[in-house]
Amino acid sequence: MNDERIVLIDSGLSALKNTISDLIYELSVIEAEDEQSIKQIGVLFKETTAVEKEMESLRKFYVDPLNDTVKKINAIFKAELKELQDVIDEKKTEIAKYHARITMEAKKRAEEEQKALYADVPEEFPIKTEVVPQIPKLSEIATGMKTVTVKTWRLVDIKLVPREYLMLNEKMVDAIRKSMAVDDKSHIPGIVFETEVRVSR
């Protein structure tokens, strides 16, 4: 963002800054101790709501066009590279399958060599040299290409997962609570429906 636009924003904010400063002062000197003071705070709360809305409107006036431009630029570059990225992903999948196949073949050969090497040696023979699979590295096949071992996981049985690894679906509980009356009791084991009083402007 250039300096001229920042100056323009500052000028647009100047009046609001003064209003905000006044509201901060007026709210800070009033103590909520009786009905009269709470009424005064209520009036100031309405003014703060109006200022916040005006501030948000002004922010969007400057930000929204910039965000729209950024989205359009990103979309252009992403679209230009999409077809290339699709082909790259396809080749990566093919290479991964190839590497998995040659790895399996190398391990199988190593097992066969191990068996052949000790074919005449009794099973109880204590010392055996393990035949290490000779797996070609991708960097030896193609310059600049390599495999990366990524740590992953997958769920096989949710019932076996310890409780400390499970997470409560808070959105579902919130939705159920909001759909019920204030005094309704919870039908969800382990969860109690309560109420609390909050100050709203």
Image (cartoon, helix red, strand yellow):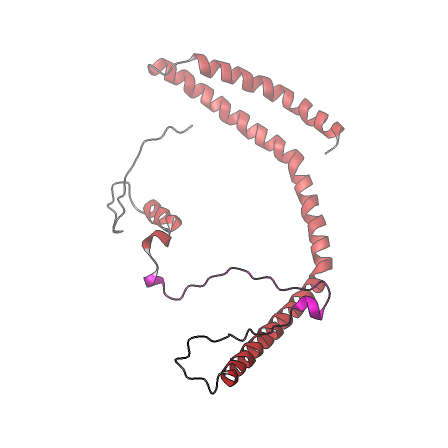
Rendered residue at 27%/47% (across/down): 191
Residue 22 at x, y percent in the picture:
53, 15
Among the 4 quarters of the image, the one containing residue 178: top left
User: Could you tell me if residue 166 is visible in this image?
Assistant: no
Residue 104 horizontal side relative to residue 174, left or right: right
Rendered residue at 31%/34% (across/down): 196
Residue 173 horizontal side relative to residue 54, left or right: left
Q: Assess whether residue 140 is covered by the magenta stretch.
A: yes
Depicted 37 relative to depicted 80: above or below: above
Quarter that holds the C terminus: top left
Furthest residue in direction top, as rendered: 29
Residue 154 at x, y percent in the picture:
45, 63
Q: Assess whether residue 97 is covered by the magenta stretch.
A: no
Please tell me how many numbered marks the rendered image carries: 0
User: Could you tell me if residue 104 is visible in this image?
Assistant: yes
Among the 4 quarters of the image, the one containing residue 197: top left
Residue 17 at x, y percent in the picture:
59, 20
Q: Is the magenta stretch mostly helix, strand or loop?
A: loop
Depicted 113 relative to depicted 55: above or below: below
User: What segment carries the magenta color?
Assistant: 133-160
Quarter that holds the N terminus: top right
Residue 47 horizontal side relative to residue 7, left or right: left
Residue 166 at x, y percent in the picture:
36, 54
Q: Which of 131 and 151 is in front in this view?
A: 131
Among the 4 quarters of the image, the one containing residue 81: bottom right
Residue 64 horizontal side relative to residue 169, left or right: right
Rendered residue at 50%/61% (across/down): 152
Rendered residue at 48%/86% (across/down): 119
Q: Which of 140 and 68 is in front in this view?
A: 140
